[in-house]
Each structure stands twice: as structure tokens, then as C-alpha cells.
Amino acid sequence: MQVSHKVSVVFDEANLVSSAGLVPALGLARRAGLHDLLTGRVSVPGPAGANVAVKVTSLVAAMLAGADCIEDTGVLRHGGMGRLLGDGRAATTLGTHLRAYRFGHVRQLDAVAARFLNGLAGQAPGLVAGGGQRCFVDVDDTMRETHGYAKQGVAYGYCKVKGLNAQLAVLSGGSAAPVIAGVRLRRGNIASAHGAARLVGDALATARRAGVCGQVTVRADSAYYGHALVAAAGKGGALFSVTARMDPQIARAIAAIDEAAWVGIKYPQAIFDEQQQRWISDAQVAEVPYTAFTSRRKAEHVTGRLIVRRVKRLGPEHVPAGQGELFTAWRHHVVFTNSQQPMLAAEAEHRDHAIVEQVIADLKDGPLAHLPSGVFTANAAWTVIATMAFNLTRAVGVLASTRHARARGATIRRQLINLPARIARSARRIRLHLPQHWPWQEPFTRLYTAACGPPVAVAD
């Protein structure tokens, strides 16, 4: 393939758009109630707070198209976008709007995001697991690195990175791809578990409203091991599965496990022994009953079980010279849970907590590539809007095809959202001329039919 040498470039076409996929996506958002929710629940004061629904929807649309800073929202103001979607607000207007938010207004956006997920679940069956399927709420946080000295709340966090901290609750289960049930932006030097109990409670309520009626398990890593999160899970009617920090009490519980209780599992380089019908592995699992938080009053003690995975330490610093066959050193990974699943299933389920990292990576590959403002509450509002755009992208994928239902956000943007088109008018209707032989024509047609109704055929 070679570019012709007889190509000239002129920016003069008023009927072209680069993101025709925003038409069904925003149609789906309206059907899910986003416009009405913003109008009825968000009340930012002053001139900057006028037309909240239009401004926030503009931000969502820009993020769907790939915007990761306020300046990128200019993608909505080119060619025929004004005729197709209405007049988009200028980037400066949207930035002024975000800077007018205070903490209470961000919480209003949180309420809109939760109810918007509920609306999307009603419009896109399969977006969240239903029908009694087991679901999981995964809690984790990430540092969003920032530069400069003007941003409010910036500090060095636990990973020695200077920035702001975003805490997420991700809902997944069954065949459904993960969606975001809650998010909080926090200052950079805050403890990971701070505020997690409130976030878990809100996320569980959101999950129930979105149609989750099966058993829910809250999963988290060792940074969240504590009574507050476990109690919040129980209060919300959920089970818990939390990585436990190694302390003397847990070390004694592990030491009390009988050697015969350890079971080999399928792990890297594991070999299945057909004769013995078991895995010969460098990793083994055992369980033991355990009561946690015994330093608290008796009513706050929590009884469950420890599921312990031990992995051989194979480095020479852990194996004395000449004693490889006699001396085995182990590294232990401990999970505290009240799940009723069999031991090996519960241990494998807990490892699936890593799905939250995929969501974080997707956000950082999209609207959270930057936190665009120096004002903390503006960045907090941007983060909540980013989760609304993420969930809308997931709903778009669900309606398009089974393959897109679990695709990355960048894939959905490339194949279904950032679709070039030419606008024409016929019989007082707008007609979009899309590229011939577009590889993803069938998924886009399914999406358009579900979000906007069957396309109207107009004779040439």
C-alpha cells in the first residue's frame, strides 16, 4: 500500500463528522435517563451551573470519542456535529462549569452515576449479571500521577508517586464485563482503606438497584483488611473475601495447619499426576477456621476461614547451599473469607479480583489519562463523569455484539464510536453516509437499532 503523490488537503467540508457512533451512544444515554437525572439532581450555582445536562452530556460524549483533557472536548465542534448533536459547548465553557463544583455537587453527580448505571442495565440486558447469578464487588485504588505544583490535593502516595488517589468499586459477575459501581477521588497521601466502607455500602446499593439479586461477594487486597470493610459488606448483605496481612495471630494459625492438609493446585509449571489424581505443583492451598479482629469488643469479632496459598521460594537466597532437597522455604498468601464455596474455588475466585486492574488500565487509557484541572472538586467531577462514560461504553458494546461486550474501551471507540460519516438531508431527515465495507457494519447496525430504532431507508 502506497500513498498517492497527488493528494492535497483542505479543511472545508461542513458535512463531515468523525464520530458518528455518538448518535446511537447518546441516544442510549437519553433512553437510560441521563438528561433527566442531571436536570433533576445536579444544581451547580451561578452562571457556570446553567444547562448542567447539556454540559455534562457534552463531557460524556467527548470522553466516548477519546477526550482525556478539557481541550479535547473541541472534538464535538467540527464539521456537521452541530447539526447532528446540537451545539456543543466550548472547552472553556466546560472547564468553567467543572471549576464551579463543590463537594456536595460532586456527590450529586455520584447519585446520578449510580442511577444512570441502573438505567443502562434496563436498556442493555446483560450489562450486569442478573437472574440470581453470583456477583463480585472489587474495591481498589490507584494513583493518578500529576505534574506541577498548582493542583489541589496532590501529594506523594503509597507507591512514591506524586498525584491524586482514585478509589473504585467495580461490579462484575457471570458473563458480564465489569462496570463501575462507585468512585471517589482523594488526596494523594491518603490511606487506601479510608472511606472504603462508605464506598462499599453505596456500591452494593447500586448493584441491587441495577438488578443484581444473587449472592454478592466483596473482594479486596490486604490494604483493605480491617473491620470497617468487612462490616460494611455484612451490612449490605454481601460476603467478603479480603487478603489478610501477615501478623503474629495469622502466622500462628498457619503454623497450626497439618502438613497433610495442603493440596497442590494448577499453577505455572504444575504437572497433573494421573496415577495419584493430583497436581504436583510449586503452589499448595489449605484452609483453617479463624476469628478476626479479636482485639475489638466481642460483638465485633468476625468468624470465617483463612484460605492460605503457599508458593515455594526458589531463589538461592532462600535455599541454603546444598540443601535444595531437604530445605523448602514458602511464601504465604492469606485470604480471610466467609464464602461458602469449596476451598479451591474460593481461592481461585479471590485471585480473579485482578479484574479491577483491567478497569483501571482502561480508564487510564481514556479519560483518566490526565486530571485536567488545578481545582480538586473539578477533578473529582471529571472522575465521576469518566465512570459514566465508561459504563456507557460498556453498554454500547453489549448492544453491538457478544465480542464487543467484553472488548476494551479503546476497541469500542475505534470500531463503533469514531466512525466517519457524511451528513445529507432528504425528506427533512438527516441521513448519515457511512464508509462502504466498514468491517464492523453489522455490530454498529445492531447498536443503532437498539438505541435509536431501525434505520430509515431513503431512496437515492
Image (tube, rainbow, N blue to C red):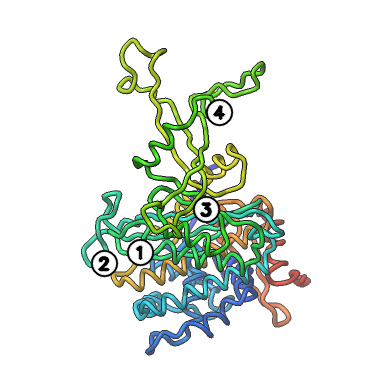
N-terminal of the pair, mark 3 or mark 2, is: 2
Q: Residue furthest top?
A: 322
Image spot of residue 106 (x, y percent): 41, 75
* Residue sticking out furthest to the left: 149
Residue in the image at 33% along x and 23% along y = 318
246 is higher (above) or lower (below) than 47:
above
Disc 4 residue type (three-letter):
Val
Q: To which residue does mark 3 refer? A: 240
Residue indicated by mark 1: 371
- Residue type for callout 3: Phe
Q: Nearer the viewer, mark 4 or mark 1?
A: 4
Cβ atoms under marks 1 and 3 closer than 8 Å: no
- Label 2 sits on what residue type? Lys
Image check: 189 left or right of 421? left
* Labels 1 and 2 touching (C-beta < 8 A): yes
Question: Dot 4, how many residues are within 10 Å of its Cα: few (below 14), some (14-19), or many (20+)?
Answer: some
454 or 251, which lies in front? Answer: 251
Mark 4 or mark 2, which has the lower sequence index?
2
Q: Judge whether 334 appears above or below 203 on screen.
A: above
Give coordinates of residue 254: x percent, y percent.
43, 35
Instruction: Check residue 274 in the rendering and tell me which mark sits there, or answer none.
Output: none
Q: Earlier in the sequence, mark 1 or mark 2?
A: 2
For the C terminus, give its image quadrant.
bottom right
CA neighbours of label 3 inside 10 A, class few (<14), some (14 to 19), many (20+)? many
Q: How far is the residue under mark 1 from the one under mark 2?
A: 9 Å
| Distance from the alpha carbon under mark 1 to that under mark 3 | 32 Å
Which residue, given by chain and number where applicable, does mark 4 sit on?
A: 263
Q: Position of residue 102 (x, y in %)?
A: 35, 79
